[in-house]
Image (cartoon, helix red, strand yellow):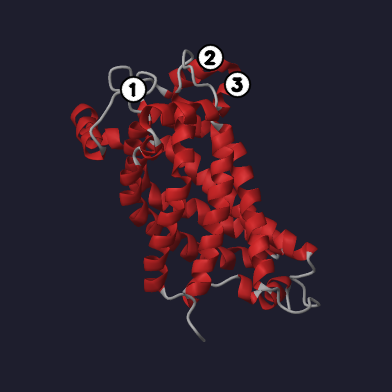
Amino acid sequence: MDAAEAHRGSLGQAEINWDKLDKSKFYVVGAGIFTGLTVGLYPISVVKTRLQVATKEAVEKDAFSVIKGILRTDGIPGLYRGFGTVITGAIPARIIFLTALETTKVAAYKMVEPFKFSEPTQAAIANGIAGMSASLCSQAVFVPIDVVSQKLMVQGYSGHASYNGGLDVVRQVLKTDGIRGLYRGFGLSIMTYSPSSAVWWASYGSSQRFIWRLLGQGSEHAGQAPSQGTIVMVQAAGGIFAGATASCITTPLDTIKTRLQVMGHAKRPTTRQIVKTLISEDGWTGFYRGLGPRFFSMSAWGTSMILAYEYLKRLCAKEE
């Protein structure tokens, strides 16, 4: 029995393969679960985006002052600007992402098995490849949603234009920039989200295995299978570690991408100009604007998402 087989034997109930899922139930129930998570965590994205696009003269310099400013001018609805657009596009994007993630993960595991890496290394490579592939596949849907929602998030803030909803944003972007306008920052989105997804899933996969080994699981001498409570705790710890790692590595690219996407047609900057502006205003720390909210968002979203995702897989597992 090799290490991978031993691990799967002792932790079989912790991981459910794609071919064991009821796909219809998985997508329908998943849409509801992830919509609920988005409702809870969306305000963090609004705060992060505003911090990233704030000019040097902006009064609101931190997350708490941004929140107070939004509540003062728009109330609770201000924390959900662009939410309708995100929900509309998130469902097809999530379906594409999860399908690509699970199918690629199976192929990636088969690809790395002959190299006889340790189980955490195998998991990191396979999950990283799957996460990057899934992100690449979903960007075609996600980037236009990102462009529209971020323009709504910052409308009227720090000199940005105001709109009458998501459709108005689409009309104005198409009028001034054509279809390319909806894909502004596409290259940077690929460079941001694909590595971020790869790092997140690689960190999640490897940290889980590492924790299981610390708990005495993952070897042929392991005792009884872990309880559901233990599984959930390990998955949550893996999600927190993955979110922290990914946010620290990818925040600079996310800051540049966000600024590129929300700037108006008349004063459209290049990527180089954005980099120069950030450095001149805040030095190299300017690239980490919104790190706090992004760190919290990726850790909170990642942990919530992975727990919901793993629960969904258990819920939708076909009975043998």
Q: Quadrant of residue 8?
A: bottom right
Q: Residues within 10 Å of mark 3 (few under 14, many from 20)?
A: some
Badge 1 is on which residue? 160
- Look at the image and tell me whether residue 124 can be seen: no
The amino acid marked with disc number 3 is: Trp
Q: Quadrant of residue 167?
A: top left
Q: Is residue 284 left or right of residue 94?
A: right
The amino acid marked with disc number 1 is: His
Which of discs 1 and 3 lies nearer the camera? The answer is 1
Reply above or below: 207 against 271. below
Residue 126, which numbered label? Answer: none
Mark pair 2, 3: CA separation:
9 Å
**What's the residue at 38%, 35% (across, down)?**
78
Badge 3 is on which residue? 284
Q: Determine the residue located farthest toward the bottom in the rendered image.
A: 320
Mark pair 1, 2: CA separation:
19 Å
Q: Is residue 63 left or right of residue 112?
A: left
Image coordinates of residue 18 in percent, x first then y, are: 49, 71
Contact? badges 1 and 3 (CB < 8 Å): no
Contact? badges 2 and 3 (CB < 8 Å): no
Give the mark nearest the N terminus, 1 or 3.
1
